[in-house]
Image: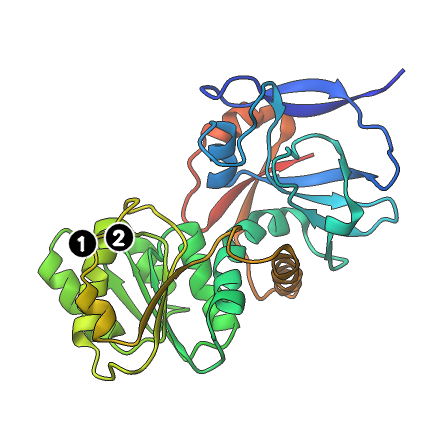
Amino acid sequence: MTGMVDAALVESFDEPPRYRSIPAPEPESGREVVDVLAVGVHPATKGIAAGKHYTSPTELPALAGADAVVRRTDGSLAYVMPMGAGTLAQRLLIDPGAAIPVPAGADPAVVAATMNPAMSSWGALRTRVPFEPGKSVLVLGATGNAGSMAVQVARHLGADKIVAAGRNRDRLDELKSHADEVVALTAEQDRTSAALAAAAAEVDVVLDYLWGPPTQLAMQAVLGARTQHTRLLDWVQIGGMGGPEITLSGHALRSNAFRILGSGFGSITQEALNQVLREVAEAIASGGLSVRPRPVPLAEVEKAWTHHDAPGERTVIIL
């Protein structure tokens, strides 16, 4: 008879996942059973479990979780992110070819907390734009976890100047240790626009986690203050916390060397994504990047799901 394992199941899109027992996975040809060590409770993970993500399950109940740090049968650590499948169970059946090696000695909780926030900016700078050390970066929406991690990533990859712009003033003060300049995004549009123009007029790359009206304001400010209009500006749309749409004048595109592009799972190949994940895992293990994990046992998954992480913190389910 098949054994049982503890897990977290999505039984309703309107409620947190429930702590349950499910049949343990059985080995299959070309697949590997692994022990799950840590699973991050990321915003995207919650969105998937709420039925609001394009990878949300179509049938319930379904296993919660979007990624995991696991221990393989040979004892090594790996990071897995099975698209369209859950990860919150004591053991999983994985495709060995999709397992991203995690250096020995790395803290599984730190890796689980950091991989998801770090991969968006790392992927954007490594695969979507011609970024190289010495260039300058504006992070728009820098006070969220992914945005604040983008500041660290840009510095780690060699940015010469980093401007961090966001709403949370306390978090902006904390980012001063990583960013060269900070800009508070406030309801006073004229003041915000002037501050963005002064700090970010000549940046090479914008990593945009906001979109919507805040991006419209920032684009107008940065492009209007730019003195080298033929110097390429890559504006990379990564998140939509400020809204799903913008209105953009064609004049802005014609009067500047200005490109708008997105960065996400559909914009890079699986091979490129795997390379990004390997690089991020190595950077985390070396101490170059870190989000503070807030460990919670699997049995308390319902409470963990409703917790609001503090800036710089990420809830991690420990199995």
Q: How is the image coloured?
A: rainbow
Viewer-nearest residue: 171 or 19: 19
User: Disc 2 marks which amino acid?
Assistant: Arg
User: Is there any visible trace of residue 222 in the rendered image?
Assistant: no
In the rendered view, tell whether residue 98 sits above or below residue 154: above
Residue at x 44% of width, y 83% of height: 134
Q: Is residue 175 above or below residue 294?
A: below
Q: Nearer the viewer, residue 273 or 68?
A: 273
Residue 61 placement: quadrant: top right
Q: In the displayed structure, does residue 8 sit left or right of residue 238?
A: right
For residue 186, which numbered disc appears in the image? 1
Q: Residues within 10 Å of mark 1 (few under 14, many from 20)?
A: some
Q: Is residue 84 above or below residue 164?
A: above
Which residue matches tag 2?
167
Q: How many marks?
A: 2
- Provide residue 139's location: percent of width, then percent of height: 36, 63
Where in the figure is residue 191, as x and y percent of width and height?
12, 62
**Labels 2 & 1 near each other (Cβ < 8 A):** yes
Density class for disc 2 (Cα within 10 Å; few <14, some 14-19, many ≥20) is some
- Secondary structure beneath dot 1 equals loop
Q: Please, what is the three-letter code of the amino acid marked with disc 1?
A: Thr
Residue at (22% x, 62% y) in the render = 218
Position of the N terminus by quadrant: top right
The x and y percentages for residue 261 are: 39, 61
In this rendered view, identify the residue nearer to me: 177 or 215: 215
Image quarter where the C terminus lies is top right
